[in-house]
Image (spheres, rainbow, N blue to C red):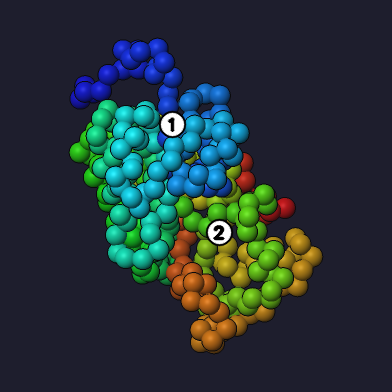
Amino acid sequence: MPSNQPSLGALPSRFRRERVLIVGCGDVGLRVARQMQGRVRLFALTSQPERVAELRDRGLTPLLGNLDVGANLQRLAGIATRVVHLAPPPSEGWTDQRSLALVRALRLRQKPISAVYGSTSGVYGDCSGEWVPETRTLHAQTPRALRRINAEAQVRFWGLSSCVRVSILRIPGIYATDRDGGTPRARLLKGVPVLRAQDDVYTNHIQADDLARACCLAVWRGAAQRVYNVNDDSCMKMGDYFDMAADLYGLPRPPRIARDGASSQLPLMLLSFMNESRRMVNARMKRELRLTLRYPTVLSGLG
């Protein structure tokens, strides 16, 4: 089907360079910007005036706006040829009004060619340790995962109705040695327990720079309205992961506890992760995005 959008060659010269808008320019967003630096013009949406100077120093053009105040997002319309949406949903409710406000603003003028939305592997819910491809029926079990399902639906509908090529990335636990809180060291130092082997759950991981590379590749190579699991090749249970990290850091391995006693010793957020077990299949990411992982296992990324 021919596109109803003008080609870059038909635009004034100042607009011919690809323009990428990063929404949610935290740690991963900045890594995406670093990967794209020098090849495209970069914009970043921020609601924090104090970040303007930092973003400029990193080579981005900052745009002040708040996803919780849809009226101030109109300036985003038509500004970018590609969008990377990494902003999380609100912390309450069952819908993602932030994604809704964003796509409403992006509809107003010339639409971007492609967009990438960073979702979460939590949308799958508990899979009892089974292998999970992107075609698996969603079974979110927490409010935050339900909000992500709502966000995915909104972004995909926008893509379908506006002829924007949208890619959804389902992302597990993000780690990196140069990321704030990006390693298990602090938790190991606190001696937080993990489940005993017979009660333990499978977890999935992705190194932050590999995730940023996946975002960049999806901007250019992602298929329309396509979902991609973005995870490394590790196949580890949570307790084994923390044991491995403890051995790397020369720290004591965490104590093991039975699931029956976990509710009295662990915070609710951590318990929710321990109630879900799955092994994500990343073949589509490798085949279609053609991503070669620099850190194929958490051992290679933390070691």
Q: Which residue lies at the image location 46% right of the left edge and 72% below the top edge?
A: 272
Query: Where residue 88 appears, x then y in whole percent?
Result: 42, 54
Q: Residues within 10 Å of mark 1 (few under 14, many from 20)?
A: many
Number of dots carrying numbers:
2
Which amino acid type corresponds to the residue marked 2 in the rendered image? Cys
Question: Is residue 46 visible from the viewing direction of this image?
Answer: yes
Foreground residue among 147 and 58: 58
Which amino acid type corresponds to the residue marked 1 in the rendered image? Val
Q: Residue 56's quadrant in the figure?
A: top right
- Looking at the image, residue 12 sits to the left or right of residue 270; the answer is left
Question: Is residue 224 visible from the viewing direction of this image?
Answer: no
Q: Secondary structure at mark 1?
A: strand
Q: Which residue lies at the image location 42% right of the left edge and 23% below the top edge?
A: 18
**Image quadrant for the N terminus?**
top left
Foreground residue among 21 and 236: 21
Q: Which residue is mark 2?
A: 235
Q: Which residue is mark 1?
A: 20
Which residue, as the protein is rendered here, is positioned at the far right?
250
Nearest-to-viewer mark from 2 and 1: 1
CA distance separating discs 2 and 1 = 34 Å
Q: Residue 234's quadrant in the figure?
A: bottom right
**Vertically, is 237 above or below 78?**
below
Mark 2 or 1 closer to N-term? 1
